[in-house]
Amino acid sequence: MSFSANRVIIAGNLVRDPEPRPVGSDRNVAHFTVAINNRYKSADGELKETAVFMDCEAWGKQAELVCTYLKKGSCAYFEGQLKQDNWQDKDGQRRSRIKVRIDVVRFVGNQRQGGDEGEGEGEGEQTASSAPPATAANPAAMPARPGPSRARATAHSLAAGCDTEPPF
C-alpha cells in the first residue's frame, strides 16, 4: 500500500497583479506569484531573511476573486495542491515547473480602496465584510470556515507573517 498527500499552505505578498485569462467560453484562470518571506537567525545570531517565490494559478470563481480583490503587494493566505507543468521550449529542450493550484483564498487586511475584504473557498462561495482586518492581534476577525480548528490557527499564524512591505 502506498501513501501520498498533496496539500500546500502558503501566506505571502503578491509580486505583481494577477494575470486573468479566459479558457474556453465559460472558464477563467488567473496566474500570479506569491513571495513568502523566511526569517531565521544565523549561527552568529544575526537575523537573516530570504524569500521564496511560488507561481500560483486559480481557476473559475477563485480566479475572479483573486483578480478582483488582490493586487501587487497584497497579503493573502492560500491553500492548494502542487501541480507540475511540462513542455518543450523552442530549442526542443524539455522543461518543467512546479506551481500551486489554489483552491482556498483568505484575504488578509484591506485589499481594495473601499476597505472591503472577502474570503473565497471553493468554486461558488464568497463572503464580504467590513470587519476589521484579520491579524494575529485580532484573530476573531478571521472568518470561520468548516473544518478543523487547527487549519484556522494555521491561517492566523501564517497571515501574521505577511509583510506590509513586499520583498521586491
Image: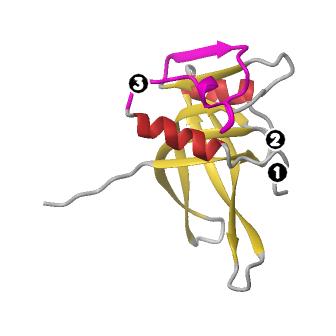
Instruction: Looking at this view, name the residue that lies furthest to the bottom.
Output: 44
Point out which mark residue 146 bears.
3
Point out which mark residue 166 bears.
1
| Quadrant in which the N terminus is drawn | bottom left
SS type, badge 3: loop
Side of 37 relative to 122 (left or right): right
x, y percent for residue 141: 63, 24
SS type, badge 1: loop
Q: Are marks 1 and 2 in contact (CB under 8 Å)?
A: yes
For badge 3, the amino acid type reads Pro
Q: Mark 2: few, some, or many residues within 10 Å (few <14, many ≥20)?
A: some
x, y percent for residue 42: 70, 80
Residue mark closest to the camera, 1 vs 3: 3
For badge 1, the amino acid type reads Pro
User: Residue at coordinates 79% horizontally, 35% vertically from top-left?
Assistant: 71
Query: Disc 2 designates what residue?
Result: 72
x, y percent for residue 125: 51, 17
> In the displayed structure, would residue 91 be above or below residue 68?
below
Label 2 – label 3 distance at C-alpha: 29 Å
Side of 147 relative to 53 (left or right): left
For badge 2, the amino acid type reads Lys
**Residue 29 visible within the image:** yes
Is 32 one of the magenta-colored residues? no
User: Residue at coordinates 65% horizontally, 39% vertically from top-left?
Assistant: 136
Marks 1 and 3, the one that precedes in the sequence: 3
Marks 1 and 2, the one that precedes in the sequence: 2
Q: Which residues are magenta?
A: 123-147
> In the displayed structure, would residue 121 be above or below residue 2?
above
